[in-house]
Amino acid sequence: MIRCTPAVLLALALTALPACADALLEQAQADFMTLCAPCHGDDGRGHGPKAASLSAHPADLTQIAARYGSFPEDKVFATIAGLDMPEGHGTRAMPIWGDVFVTEGVGKSTTLADAMKASDDASRRIAALVRYIASIQAAP
Ligand code: HEC
């Protein structure tokens, strides 16, 4: 059985048919402008309108590859999803998007099938955001 690690989910999103991949990237860009730009800025450099009021400065998302030497897809996925939270949740300046997307996807449903679908959809949405962020990396 394939274990659904972030890497596997990401690979699934990345190897989707080109047409699907384009649609995913467009969805990710729309998500980014609505959900991420308020803090990280339209260009991802960390100067969104909400940035000044936060206790922690939003990261410059265009410099991740430069900072790590290459683009760490798994790490970025984990950060957005909230999988790398040391203390469960709620302490960082950025929302835990994994929780936000799953909650949004489940809505008022109480079925396991809907919960699992919401979790899959949330993973795909985050993997697409990872791809979008990879696409805006500054040239080294
Ligand atoms: C409320 C403000 C806020 C919003 C909205 C927000 N972020 Fe962040 N983000 C931060 C802050 C602050 C940090 C750095 C410190 C931290 O993690 O608390 C950060 C860090 C990150 C990092 C880690 C970068 C690195 O260098 O390792 C990634 C990736 C990231 N954000 C992606 C996103 C994505 C994708 C979205 C939209 C779905 C988003 N953020 C929305 C505030 C925000």
Image: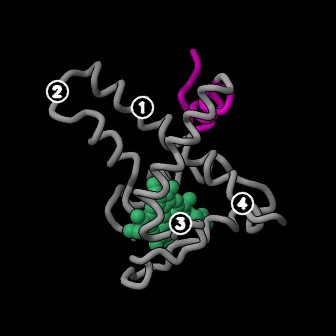
Residue at mark 2: 110
Q: Residue furthest bottom?
A: 52
Q: Compare marks 3 and 1 and give the one earlier in the sequence.
A: 3
Q: Residue at x 55, y 42 (%)?
A: 26
Cα distance, mark 4 to mark 3? 13 Å
Circle 4 Cα neighbour tier, 10 Å, few/some/many (<14 / 14–19 / ≥20): some
Asked if residue 108 lies in the magenta stretch, the reply is no
Quadrant where the N terminus sits is: top right
Q: Is residue 66 above or below residue 107?
A: below
95 left or right, relative to 78: left
Q: Does dot 2 land on a helix, a strand or a loop?
A: loop
Badge number at residue 137: 4
Asked if residue 8 lies in the magenta stretch, the reply is yes
* Residues shaded magenta: 1-16
Q: Does dot 1 land on a helix, a strand or a loop?
A: helix
Residue at mark 1: 121
